[in-house]
């Protein structure tokens, strides 16, 4: 097997790659000789995929053929249109990852096929699985997913192994916010709790600024810019530049010539903005980081006064208001002891070296992590309410095994369907559905007399094993939900059972009904077309739920065709 494992920080705005060699994490340069690769993918006129700096440079010219900030949509099932073509967020991420694989192979002068990829700590299993799939599609064996703040802490921890303390990692990047509380002692890095917000980052700061500029422009010229994709792309570019400049300057002048037209006269945008004005625009966004911080403090049971250090990670922590707000909130001055842009990739590379056995037990760091979301099963009470029965609460150190006992509800009940969910709602169906299985052969008995033991084991790679045991007979049934090898386990999919309640046209209802009938009457010989049918049916319901009419129409057409010509 190829030996070298690289570490990849696949960010919302930028992507970095590192490798551990000569006893340190070294950043890998891309084809342009830079460490930082924009996380941008575009489709050129001839249908070729362009990735990185080139794609970013084309964004203002070809906004409709360019995808930026794809990571924000991961796990949503929302397709992305580039030119006339539709791509999934998984595919777009795989183009980015394939690009890193090519430049890392060139830089290291060997064919690279193994990687540790970092993900926001607050990603759920559905989002994590999408990253693993994208990695595979890009030609990688994904050795592990590591949580971004944990990776950042590792790149700090490896140089400070003798210290003992509680560290809070505050990671505010382009699109996601993560906060993690760790304890360090004797070279052991123990994650105590993680929380965050998957939709909070520098992108949102840019959008506030864009909104403000659009308002001013409309006031002055009576022209609305929001529908003009070209103008919006230029605004995005300038707003980000302005935001970055305001991190060091007190005031910035934004000038965009020929941004729009009115009565065939070109209009320019000219605005002056001070740091104070910008801070007002984003103050509530920064305040949104407080709740996740309170969650990690409460879940870990660590008091503010016990924090030895607040480590800043991610490009958006360069906004001066972030440090001021943190100091006021936690009573401790945050530090940038690690490189805010490189440390996540470096930590992933350190993790890769541990997997490759290059960082021995003695010289190395021991690391533990936590599960960011609660795991449980759906149960019902006598009013048939749908309840999330917690088996593994969030922020428990992993790997972990926990179990609980449940009993039958009806007299003579012989089967129980075990449905596994992930999330914080007390109503199971509001959480993410991960998988299910049927426990059969329960002895007939009075209600509540038969007991079922349900045990969950969750490992560091996000693999969840669920085992059900009938207490009276010892009969077992189980389910493995394996993020890293989805095809071996049950596929992790969203619960689409709510499609009926969603507004949907009768044409969809009719095709769904016919497809479901067909599924029930299907024979073993038709296995292949049945699998395709099942998949289309699922995707149609999902598209209806997401109100994606374009996609739903497309899938409904495919379904119709398959129902008419099942042999094809
Ligand atoms: N000097 C600066 N001042 C303010 N913002 C900055 C500065 N430098 C970079 N940024 C912002 O930081 C963000 C990118 O940060 P980073 O590269 O850490 O994010 P990412 O890793 O791509 O995203 P994520 O971790 O959220 O997936 C962008 O929104 C960028 O505009
Ligand atoms: Mg990042």
Image (cartoon, rainbow, N blue to C red):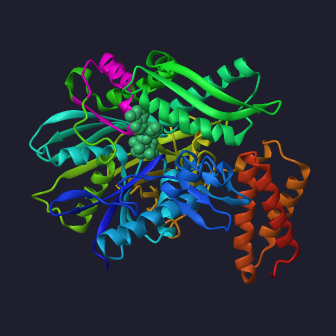
Asked which quadrant contains residue 18, the reply is: bottom left
Q: Could you say where residue 37 lies in the image, as x and y percent from the top left? A: 43, 54
Specify the quadrant that holds the N terminus. bottom left
User: Residue at coordinates 57% horizontally, 43% vertically from top-left?
Assistant: 379
149 lies left or right of 177: left
Residue 363 counted in the magenta span = no
303 lies left or right of 61: left
User: Residue at coordinates 54% horizontally, 27% vertically from top-left?
Assistant: 254
Examine the rendered structure and indicate whether residue 100 appears above or below residue 269: below
The image quadrant in which ligand 2 is located: top left
Residue 310 counted in the magenta span = yes
User: Residue at coordinates 30% horizontally, 70% vertically from top-left?
Assistant: 108
Examine the rendered structure and indicate whether residue 562 appears above or below residue 249: below
Examine the rendered structure and indicate whether residue 385 appears above or below residue 420: above
Of 546 and 435, which appears nearest the observer? 546
Magenta extent: 309-334
User: Residue at coordinates 71% horizontally, 52% vertically from top-left?
Assistant: 542
Is residue 201 visible in the rendered image? The answer is no
């Amino acid at each position: 097997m190829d030996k070298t494992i690289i570490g990849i920080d696949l960010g919302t705005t930028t992507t970095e790659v590192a490798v551990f060699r000569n006893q340190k994490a070294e950043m890998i340069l891309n084809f342009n000789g830079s460490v930082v690769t924009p996380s941008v993918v575009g489709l050129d006129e001839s249908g070729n995929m362009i990735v990185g700096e080139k794609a970013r440079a084309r964004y203002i010219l070809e906004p409709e053929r360019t995808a930026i900030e794809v990571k924000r949509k991961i796990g949503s099932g929302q397709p992305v249109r580039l030119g006339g073509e539709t791509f999934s967020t998984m595919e777009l991420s795989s183009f980015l990852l394939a690009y890193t694989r090519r430049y890392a192979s060139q830089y290291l002068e060997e064919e690279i096929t193994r990687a540790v990829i970092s993900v926001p700590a607050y990603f759920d299993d559905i989002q994590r699985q999408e990253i693993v799939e994208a990695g595979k599609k890009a030609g990688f064996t994904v050795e592990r997913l590591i949580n971004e703040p944990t990776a950042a802490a590792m790149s700090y921890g490896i140089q400070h192994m003798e210290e003992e303390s509680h560290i809070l990692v505050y990671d505010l990047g382009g699109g996601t916010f993560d906060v993690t509380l760790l304890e360090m002692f004797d070279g052991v890095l123990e994650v105590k709790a993680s929380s965050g917000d998957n939709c909070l980052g520098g992108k949102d700061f840019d959008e506030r600024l864009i909104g403000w500029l659009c308002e001013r422009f409309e006031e002055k010229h009576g022209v609305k810019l929001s529908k003009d994709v070209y103008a919006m792309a230029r605004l995005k570019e300038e707003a980000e530049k302005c935001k970055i400049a305001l991190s060091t300057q007190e005031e910035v002048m934004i000038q965009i010539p020929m941004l729009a037209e009115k009565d065939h006269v070109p209009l320019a945008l000219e605005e002056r903005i001070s740091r104070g004005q910008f801070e007002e625009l984003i103050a509530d966004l920064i305040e949104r980081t407080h709740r996740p911080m309170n969650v990690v403090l409460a879940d870990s049971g660590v008091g503010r006064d016990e924090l030895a250090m607040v480590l800043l990670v991610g490009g958006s922590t360069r906004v001066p208001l972030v440090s001021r707000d943190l100091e006021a909130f936690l009573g401790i001055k945050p530090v940038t002891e690690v490189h805010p842009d490189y440390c996540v990739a470096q930590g992933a590379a350190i993790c890769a070296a541990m997997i490759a056995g290059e960082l021995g037990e003695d010289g190395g760091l021991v690391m533990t992590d936590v599960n960011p979301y609660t795991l449980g099963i759906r149960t019902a009470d006598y009013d048939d309410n749908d309840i999330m029965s917690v088996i593994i609460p969030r922020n428990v150190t992993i790997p972990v095994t926990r179990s609980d006992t449940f009993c039958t509800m009806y007299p003579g009940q012989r089967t129980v369907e075990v449905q596994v969910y992930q999330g914080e709602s007390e109503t199971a169906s509001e959480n993410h559905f991960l998988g299910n299985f049927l426990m059969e052969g329960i002895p007939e008995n009075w209600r509540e007399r038969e007991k079922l033991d349900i045990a969950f084991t969750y490992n560091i790679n996000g693999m969840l094993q669920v085992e059900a045991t009938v207490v009276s007979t010892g009969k077992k049934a189980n389910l493995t939900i394996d993020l890293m090898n989805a095809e071996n386990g049950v596929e992790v999919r969203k619960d689409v059972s709510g499609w009926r309640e969603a507004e949907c046209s009768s044409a969809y209802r009719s095709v769904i009904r016919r497809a479901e009938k067909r599924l029930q009457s299907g024979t073993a010989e038709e296995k292949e077309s049945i699998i395709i049918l099942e998949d289309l049916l699922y995707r149609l319901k999902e598209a209806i739920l997401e109100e994606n009419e374009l996609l739903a129409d497309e899938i409904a057409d495919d379904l119709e065709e398959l129902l008419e010509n099942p042999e094809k």
